[in-house]
Amino acid sequence: MAFRKWWVVLCVFVLVFVTACSSGGGGESEGAGGTEATGGNDVVQEQPANGEDEAEAANPGATPEMDFDLGGRTIKLVSWYDEAIQTDSPDSIQRKENLDALMEKHNFTVEYVIVDYGEYRDKIASTLLAGDPLGDIIRVARPWMMPGLVKQDLFWPVDEYVTNGNAFVLQYTTDHSQFEGRGYGFRIGVSGAASGVFYNRTLMNEYGMKPLQEYVDEDNWNWETFIQVAKEGNKDTDNDGNLDRWGLATASMLIPALSSNETGIVQGSKQTLDDPKTLESLGFISRLATENIARPTEGGDWTEPKQFFLQGNTLLYPGMDYEINDFKTDMGDYDIGFLPFPKGPSASKYHTFVTIPNYYTIPRAVDNPEQLVYLWEKIYDIESIYDYPKQGDLEKFFSNEADIQNAKTSSDSIRVIEQIDYYPSMPYYEMSDELVNGVSVSTVVEKYKGPFQAAIDEVWEAPVGEQ
């Protein structure tokens, strides 16, 4: 049970980090962009100048210029941290200038409302249900709204407005905030942290191993080569019959394994433990445990795998890109690299995972959602000084160009893995612990698919108002 809370705590860190790095309900589409949504404000499409024609041709997803007057309205943006645009980089200066120009043109101001994270979920839900939301644009995490609040028609779908890939991270609308075919959230800034595998290049070179980057370059970085490398890293260097060097810091990594095989344990309102792709993922984790590939626990807490890697005697550690800062601080004598998490047998490409994605939403009680999305599009639709999103961060994290490219590649596709964060009574950790402790995949699946489905049913079949 030592790693029982490792991934959920890590995912909370991911959530906080992702939101810090960005500035970032069911219902019919009728009214979202029509008379009902206009709230009495006439929206006029301006005739674009030649420069605007050229910009539109270069970015066909951009919304044409709109002309409307918000009458001095204060737009409240609610989050658990301060999302006011800073002026600490050329890009953020451009965004602030855009905001200032838009406020003058459309006659509005912005107020940034901060709600304590510990109270956030309950406060947002209670005010939405009372018909008096805390703000016009509210940052929400997916499990806080899906399916309960969305089924109660408390949010506007925004997918018809979110088309500009230069301003928005489109996957958050087309995938991460989807419910019954509509997207209810939008994300600005960057997609978030990249998950992958850190490796100790110093140990790799000391062992005379094939450079691990070559597996990626050959498009041969998969579960089989990962296991091969981990086995090569297990060594008894003093010949006392016991390992004193290890290839892999932990076998407790089911969530990235599911993501890397393009699957999960929940799809919609159904458990998928017995899905073929999920079975492959469970089998991978079982193999790491039963073949004694991963370093065994010494009874530590959720931080133990990282502590093992920090000791400098473990080759591989699954983690998030920003953790390199700790390795730079505490492992100055070692050269640390970063790889994508290896592909599963059913995967088409590399993936990063997230369990609790978050994004902006617009409550149904708020008028003119198309205008709000438009304003945030125009704030963030800039000509960046960077060649790609998150370039500044990745170049701070990594000095090796291959490591940077691996983090970029990992972030190109982010998969959402639903588990206990969505379904409170799901015995996720009990199942994961049994798998890591060597219980067979078939036994685990037969034992837990019923309780998993029951936990999902509690959420999906709860009467409206009790979710």
Image (spheres, rainbow, N blue to C red):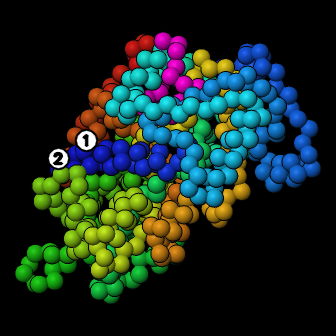
Kindly identify the amino acid type of the residue bearing the numbered disc 2. Answer: Met
Q: Toward which corner of the image does residue 125 lie, by quadrant?
A: top left
Q: Secondary structure at mark 1?
A: helix
Foreground residue, 211 or 117?
A: 117
Discs 2, 1 touching: Cβ within 8 Å:
yes
Q: Residue at x 76, y 45 (%)?
A: 61
Nearest to N terminus: mark 2 or mark 1: 2
Please state the horizontal and vertical placement of residue 210, each as a whole percent of the image. Answer: 39, 83
Residue assigned mark 2: 1
Looking at the rendered image, the quarter that the C terminus falls into is: top left
Please state the horizontal and vertical placement of residue 240, each as a whole percent of the image. Answer: 7, 81
**Horizontal arrangement in the rendering, residue 268 relative to residue 265 (left or right):** right
In this rendering, the answer to whether 143 lies above or below 227 is above
In this rendering, the answer to whether 113 lies above or below 309 is above
Q: CA distance from mark 2 to mark 1?
A: 8 Å
**Horizontal arrangement in the rendering, residue 11 relative to residue 349 (left or right):** left
Q: Residue at x 47, y 75 (%)?
A: 399
Residue assigned mark 1: 429
In this rendering, the answer to whether 304 lies above or below 109 is below
Residue 243 colored in magenta in the image: no
**Horizontal arrangement in the rendering, residue 213 relative to residue 40 (left or right):** left
Foreground residue, 287 or 104?
A: 104
Residue 411 seen anywhere in this rendered image of the structure: yes
The magenta span reads 130-147
**Horizontal arrangement in the rendering, residue 252 relative to residue 392 (left or right):** left
Kindly identify the amino acid type of the residue bearing the numbered disc 1. Answer: Tyr
